[in-house]
Amino acid sequence: MQKFIKAGYGFTVGQNFARAVCDTPIELAPTEYARPGHVIGYISGNPASSLGFMRAARIRVNLRKDALTDEVQS
């Protein structure tokens, strides 16, 4: 089942912070360690992003579990 980061929810990339502008598909990594109440996952980067850390092809993110949804919100 595909998971998405809800639009407006924040996530961290290393020491950097960003917010999802729209519902963003995420590939969860359940075997990687995350603090209680958080998950680790991977999203696709955006080469045109103004944030340098978001320009990689694949980005490892850390976010709270309540920032996830199973379906795209309209």
Image: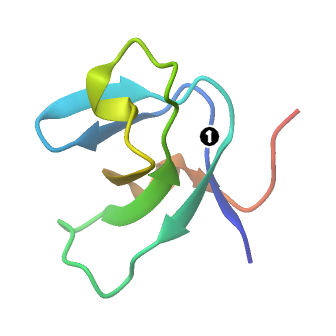
Furthest toward the left, the residue is 15
* Disc 1: which residue: 6
Furthest toward the right, the residue is 74
Furthest toward the bottom, the residue is 31
Q: Where does the image place residue 60, in percent across and percent down from the top left?
A: 32, 56
Along the horizontal axis of the image, is 22 left or right of 53? Answer: right
> Is 51 above or below relative to 43?
above
Along the horizontal axis of the image, is 66 left or right of 25? Answer: left
- 24 and 59: which is toward the camera: 59
Q: Which amino acid does label 1 sit on?
A: Lys
Along the horizontal axis of the image, is 9 left or right of 72? Answer: left
* Residue visible at 30% across and 63% down in the picture: 37
* Residue visible at 29% across and 23% down in the picture: 52
Q: Where does the image place residue 2, in percent across and percent down from the top left?
A: 72, 69
> Is 17 above or below relative to 68?
above
Q: At numbered mark 1, what does the secondary structure look like: helix, strand or loop?
A: loop
Q: Where does the image place residue 18, in percent across and percent down from the top left?
A: 36, 26
* Residue visible at 62% across and 40% down in the picture: 6
- Dot 1 alpha-carbon crowd within 10 angstroms: few under 14, some 14 to 19, many 20 or more: many
Q: Where does the image place residue 1, in percent across and percent down from the top left?
A: 74, 78
- 35 and 18: which is toward the camera: 18
> Is 65 above or below relative to 24?
below
* Residue visible at 80% across and 56% down in the picture: 71
Quadrant of the rendered image containing residue 34: bottom left
**Quarter in which the C terminus is drawn:** top right
